[in-house]
Amino acid sequence: MDSILHQRYINYSCNFSYGLYELSLRKDDKIITISSNRPEWNFCDMGMAMIGVIHVPVFTSLSVSDSEYIISNSGAKIYLVSEKRLLKYFSKAANFDPANVYTFDKIEGFNSWKEIVSKGENSPPGTRSEVKKIMEQIKHEDIATLIYTSGTTGRSKGVMLSHRNLVSNFLATADVFKLKPEDKSCRYVMLAAGLGITRPNIQEPGFITRKIWVLSPQICRK
């Protein structure tokens, strides 16, 4: 069962990265994710990291004005929204462009994130080859994610975290708690939080760090 789940994780992540490439997203482009905790968040997060797209996870509790600011300040090209409730709320932001929205739940009138996955599944060998080249060129110091602060002390600020930052965090966590590949954990923190981003891949056997996609691009099989 675990091997099936891990292969599903690999397939979705790889195909999402290929699909993003087919949509002409490139290194340092940004994607906003407005979502509750769910597996699709992890698949997309890893897919973005594979081609150097910067993930901008947004807290679902932000005000409309803060959402408008982050949408404008980040310069994101695509928004991933998990469900109708959040879509209805964040669509109130004046600069929220429905044409660039992809949803995790199936919502009438909006693109599905699986359309990106499908593009990846049907992508030509040249796309897959280019994605592997990109992965091999990503550096430890490259920005992996842009996390905006809660704004309790003023306007939200975007905190840039590199691949090295994320890797060092969850390796340190694994060391403190003596985690092994077969261990499991129960996570309460939102995936959009700094610790939430670093934690999803700790327990995945064979995936010691999210940087493994750069170190071992052959994991994405043709």
Image (cartoon, helix red, strand yellow):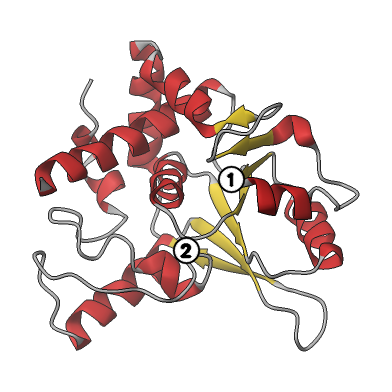
Question: Mark 1 and 2 residues: CB-CB less than 8 Å, in contact?
Answer: no
Query: What residue appears at the point 12 percent right and 49 percent down from the top-left corner?
Result: 2
Q: CA distance from mark 1 to mark 2?
A: 12 Å
Placement of 175 over or under 70, stated as above or below: below
Query: What residue appears at the point 49 percent right and 73 percent down from the top-left corner?
Result: 194
Image quarter where the N terminus lies is: top left
Q: Residues within 10 Å of mark 2 (few under 14, many from 20)?
A: some
Q: Amino acid at mark 2?
A: Ser
Residue 205: x %, y % from top left: 13, 56
The residue pinned by badge 2 equals 162
The residue pinned by badge 1 equals 28
Residue 108: x %, y % from top left: 67, 28
Q: 217 and 174: which one is in front?
A: 174
Name the disc covering residue 69, or none.
Answer: none
Figure quadrant of residue 29: top right
Image quarter where the C terminus lies is: top left
Q: Secondary structure at mark 1?
A: loop
Query: What residue appears at the point 26 percent right and 60 percent down from the top-left corner?
Result: 209
Residue 76: x %, y % from top left: 70, 46
